[in-house]
Amino acid sequence: MYGGGYVFSDPEHQIPPDDPEKLAEFEARIDRGEKIEPQDWMPYEYRRQLIRLIEQHAHSEIMGALPEGAWITRAPGFKRKLALIAKVQDEVGHAQLLYSAAETLGKSRADMVNDLLSGKSKYSNVFNYPAKTWADVAVIGFLIDAAAIVNQVANSKGSYGPYCRALERICYEESFHLKQGYDAFVALATGTKSQRAMLQDAVNRWYRPIIHFFGPPDQESKHSKQLMRWKVKMASNDDMRNQFLDSYVPKVLELDITFPDPELRKDPQTGRWQFGDPDWAEFYRVINGDGPCNAERLAVRRLAEAQGRWIRQAIMNPQQSVTIPFA
Ligand code: FAQ
């Protein structure tokens, strides 16, 4: 297939037009709800878009381990620490599943990792914000995992077999993360005055990034129309955002924790949530590399990559001797 290199990495690469008959048959299969598998014919653009989306998702899981991972040593108590270690390990495992799913489309893991480290590939906006207190870990575990589940349960019913199967497995684990996140969230919400204040502060800081998590409003979304036609995305950004707000705003409010947005309300006529200015300029700054933690997160990944190089060399070339840097 694309053994030697990754054709879509080259901006000059001319994408040949798809054979109209094959395209029609492919779209008919999608309409019938069939799964597309790696060996099947697929349009170039379907392949390119899937690689982009699955790869970004994989990077998000890896980068998503960093804000919470920093709290493992400071988790309050043995049981919270055990749960957090297991969660962080799961997130990294999700990245492995997703990189494998993206590899079935012809881009090597090495190319994907290089594109993350060079800043070429995106990853989720939310992981470019700091986790300042333990309450941030509770908010990530509850609300960001919940947001991820809304998106991933829907898309696990999509058209590309390897991605859907990876999402099904990931969703089982994310559901457990959500439970431990909710438990930590409730413990703070029903705790002392200062615990409640710490939680409220964290919710205030994460509210806007979570609104951004589902992507730009539908009218600004570049890829949604085509991806929904090909059943890669099973709902639009605004519909997913609305579904999340429907399910989780009441769960937060019932704990007497508020959102820092006086305009947040559900319109009873339309069933749609309305909110104040979500500052999409901030969203675009963050996803294009200029968020509060982008540089720090990438620096950590580059360090991990450099420190793990010797062991990758040892595994890939077992006959050759390697120098162990820290021995
Ligand atoms: N962050 O045309 P659209 C997790 C970019 S997993 C960064 O609407 P699309 C688990 C988009 O790439 C979290 N960039 O894009 C966990 C595009 O840029 P490009 C990740 C974003 O693809 C929990 C441009 O904006 N989940 O959290 C974001 O149709 C707790 C135009 O936007 C997934 O990746 C964003 N939020 O829809 C781990 C799920 N939104 O590439 C640890 C799969 C948009 O043209 C702890 N992905 N952009 O330069 C998707 O469903 C979609 O990619 C969307 C965006 C819905 C995220």
Image (spheres, rainbow, N blue to C red):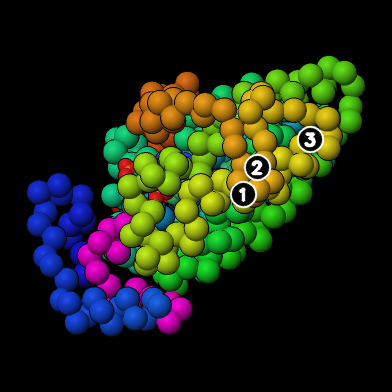
- Above or below, 86 against 100 in this view is above
- Disc on the earlier residue, 1 or 3: 3
Of 275 and 162, which appears nearest the observer?
A: 275
Residue at (76% x, 37% y) in the render:
252
Q: Is residue 22 left or right of residue 40?
A: left
The part of the image, by quadrant, that contains residue 225 is bottom left
Q: Are marks 1 and 2 in contact (CB under 8 Å)?
A: yes
Q: Residues within 10 Å of mark 2 (few under 14, many from 20)?
A: few
Q: Is residue 35 above or below residue 182?
A: below
Of the 4 image quadrants, the one containing the N terminus is bottom left
Q: Is residue 126 magenta?
A: no
Name the kind of residue labelled 1 in the image.
Thr
Residue tagged 3 = 253
Residue 218, position as x, y percentages in the image:
43, 46
**Does residue 299 lie above or below 140 as drawn?**
above
Q: Is residue 40 magenta?
A: yes
Q: In the image, what residue occupies the spot 44% across and 41% down?
A: 217
What are the residue bounds of the magenta stretch?
A: 32-50
Could you tell me if the residues under marks 3 and 2 are in contact, i.e. CB atoms within 8 Å?
Answer: no
Q: Taking 172 as reference, is 327 left or right?
A: left
| Label 2 element class | loop
**324 or 27, which lies in front?**
27
Instruction: Left or right? Give the position of 62 relative to 108.
Output: right
Label 3: element kind: helix
Residue type beneath disc 2: Asp
Secondary structure at numbered mark 1:
loop
| Mark 3 Cα-neighbour bin, 10 Å: few <14, some 14–19, many ≥20 | few
Tell me the tag on residue 267.
2
Which residue does the image show at 65% across and 48% down from the upper left? 269
**Which mark is drawn over residue 270?**
1
Is the CB atom of the residue marked by disc 3 within 8 angstroms of ligand 1's nearest atom? Answer: no
